[in-house]
Amino acid sequence: MPQHAATPFLRRRSTLAALAGGVAVTAGAGVLLSGAFAAEPAPKVVLPQADATFDYQIGGAYTPPAGVKALSRDRGAEPVRGLYNVCYVNAFQTQPDAMDWWQKQNPDLLLRDGSGEPVNDEAWGEALLDTSTAAKRTRLAKIVGSWIDGCAKSGFQAVEPDNLDSYERSGGRLTRAHNAAFAKLLATRAHAAGLAIGQKNTTDLLDQRKTIGFDFAVAEECGRYGECADYATAYGNRVFVIEYTARDFSQACSAVGAELSVVQRDLDVRPAGQKGYVFRTC
């Protein structure tokens, strides 16, 4: 499978900041099922339909265009009744405006370089979270798990934890195995909450999708990199494809538009009505 550069071209994620006040974690937040509820069956997980017309709204919510059957919104937004709603969670990196919270509350969960400074994804101004040990993954799963529970309570049907590929930007401090192990914790938490969970990018972990627990995929720029067919094969066409240029969108539509949901959005994923807004489907 193709190998990407450390910073993939036009890789896009939410511009909305995590609310520091909403990140507080109670002592029991990391327990998947307490003894009192162990006997209760987990809520039913509903998978997305293949080739359902999709809209990617992580930059701001707006009324979905006619014909849209599924969408992704930031975890702070409200889902849309009657649609299949995917909740965006920045799970492997920080939101830029949340750095103060992480530095004050959990500074050791930020990945750090040899000088003790946070390792950053320079393209988006986000610090990488440290998934390198089981103890840190467990603590991170309590925090991110509370966000996933919040997605379920809000009425979303699924979650997409972003930056699964953060190990590519870690300078060798993180590995695929570290992030796969953390993703497995998140998948277990999502399923316990009744949510499907989508693999967000990186074909490098497609062969571990069943072990991790991923149910579908959200693939940015797979048309550009010629990877859409890999996702389609792995997930039985349950793949939401996002492209950011007319050329890449055309390539994706030609290659997989008959089987997969493909959408072109503007790089800033602006809400409808704002200058520069782009929304096209095959």
Image (spheres, rainbow, N blue to C red):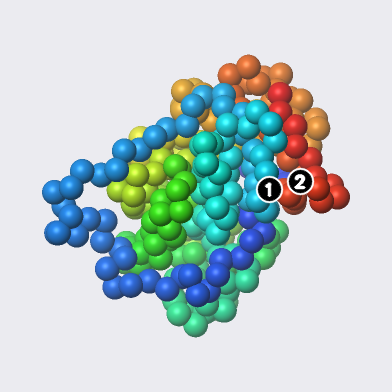
Q: Could you say which is closer to the camera, residue 209 or residue 4?
A: 209
Residue 198 located left or right of residue 14 = left
Type of residue at label 2?
Ala
* Image quarter hosting the C terminus: top right
Residue 67 located left or right of residue 245 = left
Mark 2 burial class by Cα count in 10 Å: few <14, some 14-19, many 20+: some
Q: Residue at x 46, y 70 (%)?
A: 23
- Identify the residue under disc 2: 272
Location of residue 72 in the rendering, given as x and y in whole percent from the top left corner: 58, 44
Q: Residue furthest bottom?
A: 104
Residue 124 located left or right of residue 146 = right
Provide the secondary structure element on which disc 1 rests. loop
Q: Could you say which is closer to the camera, residue 117 or residue 14?
A: 14
Q: Residue furthest front?
A: 81
Q: Could you say which is closer to the camera, residue 131 or residue 269?
A: 269
Q: Could you say which is closer to the camera, residue 143 or residue 86?
A: 86
Pointer 2 and pointer 1: residues touching (CB < 8 Å)?
yes
The image quadrant of residue 25 is bottom left
Type of residue at label 1?
Tyr
- The residues bearing labels 2 and 1 have C-alpha atoms spaced at a distance of 6 Å
Q: From this view, report whether residue 102 is shown above or below residue 156.
A: below
Residue 174 located left or right of residue 56 = left
Q: Does the image show residue 252?
A: yes
Mark linked to residue 62? 1
